[in-house]
Amino acid sequence: MIRFRRLLLFTALLLAVVVGCAAGANISTGSPTQHNFVLQECAVLMLSDRRPDSPLIPCDYVGIEFLACEDAADVQPVGNDTSSVCPYFGPRNGVYAMTNVTCEVLPCIECSGPRRFKREAKCVKFTGHYFLSTLLYSIFLGIVGVDRFCLGYSAVAVGKLMTLGGVGIWWLVDIFLLINGNLMPADDSQWMPYW
């Protein structure tokens, strides 16, 4: 049934393009060279898929929820050009670095144009650190540095362990830093989203 609908839609679109091209060219009064030009123009219109009156949107306009994009952390430099990779991950002074990633439209989405293209994306990396679990580690086990071990600051965590959380002061400061967002994972990754 779905194949029949697609075939019917494709036939209707093809007929609309051919009729539109023929009507716009006034074939009945034109010369043979004009007919060839019109047929070439119609062929270009049918192949380009960038018609403003088409019911399909261009594939590069599709929303991010309908795309499968590569992770910005996985982008490899081309040759010696390192400008295409992320210089850093996460925000620096409230600004995210941007890079071009390859995206592909999901198979069930209909759109016009190439289904694989480049799109600009934020340089964000997720490595499995959850804010809530880290906050609970900091509240209940932060006195012995478990929160710093969890975030990847092992040298600082050993110091916190040896001093028993800086006699409690370091422990309270780390809870405050976590809540304010100033204590993040050591590998520049972001907190894992919960959805």
Image (cartoon, grey):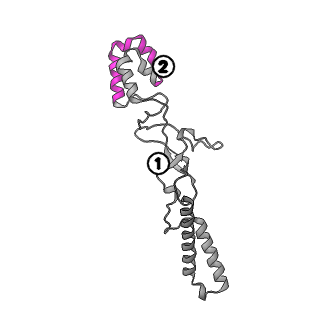
* Mark 1 Cα shell of 10 Å, populated few (<14), some (14-19), many (≥20): few
- Relative to 182, 59 lies left or right: right
Viewer-side residue, 7 vs 192: 7
- Residue 154, numbered label: 2
Q: Say which residue label 1 marks.
A: 65
| Residue appearing at x 42%, y 42% in the figure | 95
Amino acid type, residue under disc 1 in the picture? Glu
Q: Nearer the viewer, mark 1 or mark 2?
A: 1
Amino acid type, residue under disc 2 in the picture? Ser
Above or below: residue 193 compared with residue 61 = above
Marks 1 and 2 sit apart, C-alpha to C-alpha, by 37 Å
Residue 102 picture location, percent across and down: 57, 48
Report helix, strand or loop for mark 2: helix
- Relative to 159, 16 lies left or right: right
Question: Magenta stretch mostly in which secondary structure?
Answer: helix
Viewer-side residue, 42 vs 15: 15
Q: Quadrant of the C terminus?
A: top left
Q: Which residues are magenta?
A: 151-179
Mark sitting earlier along the chain (1/2): 1
- 172 inside magenta stretch: yes
Residue 125 picture location, percent across and down: 49, 36
Q: Quadrant of the N terminus?
A: bottom right
